[in-house]
Image (spheres, rainbow, N blue to C red):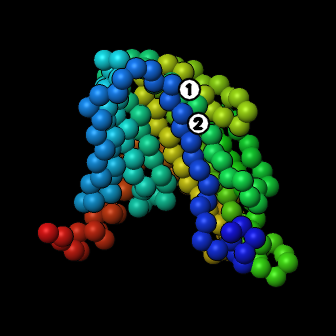
Amino acid sequence: GANAPYGCFQNFGFLNINFPIQGEVLNYKRSLDLATAKAVTRFTANGIDYTREYFTSQAKNIGAIRLTANKKRAITFALHFYREERIKGHQVQNGEILINGVLSNGFGGDDVQFAGKIKVVPKGGTIQYYDHQIIVKDANEVDIYFTASTNYYGTDPIETVHQNLASTTSSFQQLYKDHLKKYKEVFDRVKLQ
């Protein structure tokens, strides 16, 4: 776990997104396209069609989520990041969550520093903060970005996550296009049948 040398193999943490969707869910479908490294979830609730798209950018080291619906003001959720162990800082402000901490080196000291940052970009609606959560209400669509880093290669992980997310000035679609180009360079070397 977190107290073993350099933290061993453990989850970085848990990003929870809680949606207060009422009523029966219909036409639920999840898919993963290995050729594009993109996952999609679609379903209908209360006559509204929801789509959730996910990928991790091969080009920028950023996880990206897009939440859309076929009706305006239909997206409401509360988002929080959870990690129980070895956290030194947890800030929530300006549509972002920044966490940082340090892992034990296994010899009685701390050594590997880590940081993660989540950025929530709603189109329409409102954004609020409560108890380490970002709450989005009545948005038309929302993009969520996540990045993480350590000082393993001699870099400052907090500075690295700031730089990674600063590079998301382009749209979700442009980030996906850049990812796909970089991903295909590797994936398309082999064909699966």
The location of residue 104, given as percent across then percent down, is: 77, 72
| Residue at the image position 74 percent from the left and 43 percent from the top | 91
Q: Is residue 19 in view from this perspective? A: yes
Which label is found at residue 136? Answer: 1
Image coordinates for residue 49, horizontal then vertical, percent: 31, 25
What amino acid is at disc 2? Leu
Asked if 53 appears above or below 22 in the picture, the reply is below
> Which residue in the rendered view is the most extreme toward the left?
193
CA–CA distance in space, label 2 to label 1: 8 Å
Q: Residue furthest right?
A: 108
Amino acid bearing label 1: Val
Residue at x-position 14% and y-position 69%:
193
Element marked by disc 1: strand
Asked if disc 2 and disc 1 are in contact, CB closer than 8 Å, the reply is: yes
Mark 1 neighbour density, 10 Å: few (under 14) some (14–19) many (20 or more) = many
Closest to the observer: 6 or 46? 46
124 vs 108, left or right, is left
Q: Examine the image and state in which quarter residue 81 appears.
A: top right
**Residue 32 percent location from the top left of the image:** 30, 52
Badge 2 density bin: few <14, some 14–19, many ≥20, Cα 10 Å: many
Q: Earlier in the sequence, mark 2 or mark 1?
A: 2
Quarter of the figure with the N terminus:
bottom right
Q: Which mark is residue 125?
A: none
Q: Which residue is mark 2?
A: 79
